[in-house]
Image (spheres, rainbow, N blue to C red):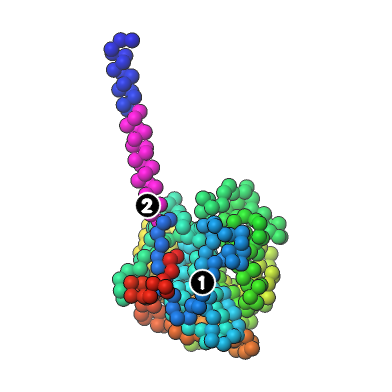
Amino acid sequence: MTNGRKDAMSKNLAWKILFVAVLVLLAVAAAVPIIRHTRFRYPVVVGPGVTRVARLSDFGPGLKGTRADTNVYVLEGREPGGKALIIANTHPNEPAGLLAALIFLENAEVDKGTLYVIPNFNRSAGLDTKPGDGYPHFYRIPTPWGEKTFRYGSRDASPLDQWPDPDVFIHYPDRQLLSFIDARNTNRTWPGRPNGLLMERVTFAAMELLRNNQVDVAIDLHGAETMFPVTNCIVAPQSASRLATRVALFVKAREKFDSHVEPSPYGFRGLSHREIGDYSDTLPFLLEAPIPFLDQPTGPKTEKLLLDGRDPFLLKLSERGKLFVPYDETGWPIDKRVGQHVSVMLEIFAQYSRQTPERSLSLRGVPRYADIVKNGTGYYFHDPKKADASRVYEE
Ligand SMILES: [Zn+2]
């Protein structure tokens, strides 16, 4: 071999090494923020109402040891009474529900009845993100003691926890054919089964919680696009529609915000508001608050848009009558969305208690819509540094 050929080969090799090194560097640079996101935990300072913390796997052992297992906070009242379950982060990319549930956890005191709260229902999705959709990894809520940071999650469970996806998701037990991605969507896998896909085990465990504890009311908290017709509303099946209507009328008259009632579609399976009603004695409600961030035709998907809901493109579409909610330059601030969720939940409990006094649920310490809009959501979160360590949990 001539020296010239040797030189050319080593030069070639050097280029190859450089190329691989750059690829590795790019991969590491891309992975570090994702790893930081998935490992991030935020503290929850549980209030005086929380009497114990269970795990969802206590109700469905098929979740034990998986990343889908999640905390179930229990607030037992001084007197027995009705029981309710609040579920947030079924879709962890819809944060108003999580923040509303945390306001209950950190502040509620229960006089009568029992409240169960699952703040991270699809925990696997909450540990994931959607880089392809430009999702911010975190969002920060101002509090009197500084900013509180939360992970911004994905809509569907992480493929790290449930994979591979089927070509078509066959709903259990109705055998309705749903989109493949719905196999990882915990608002399509109800009522679930004990030995099914991981997300079917999540919803099955929640069904067991409802059935074994004779829970009266279940509320699943969501956010929906302003261009989607089912938004800013309470979705309820026939059995719960009278109560939902009374709730909508009361919040409109007393608190001056709209939240209309949408019937739970009979033929569309897998949704919480359909299957909980069909497979247990619990009355289900699904609350949707508008979330402009999730609309397709918006500007950049920033943390600011996620929190203030202000977007010039949506404003233009609103002027052309394309949105299903009122929309002006004030957008849809997170405090308004959280406040609506909290007030609608309090009103569901109040109306249910009025209708069924022997199963009433009575609690205090939770602010209503006007308070949350005035003071901000973060006003109701407590400083973990000043709290008793035994009352601080990680989510
Ligand atoms: Zn949702």
User: Where on the picture, by quarter, is residue 395?
Assistant: bottom left
| Residue occupying image coordinates x 52% and y 64% | 70
Q: Position of residue 309 (x, y in %)?
A: 40, 67
Q: Amino acid at mark 1?
A: Val
Q: Is residue 19 magenta?
A: yes
| Residue occupying image coordinates x 57% and y 83% | 113
39 vs 269, left or right, is left
142 vs 289, left or right, is left
Predominant SS along the magenta part:
helix
Viewer-proximal residue among 350 and 383: 383
Give the secondary structure at mark 2: helix
User: Where on the picture, by quarter, is residue 9?
Assistant: top left
Residue position marked by numbered label 1 in the rendering? 53
Q: Position of residue 216 (x, y in %)?
A: 63, 79
**Which mark identifies residue 33?**
2
Residue range corresponding to the magenta coloring: 16-37
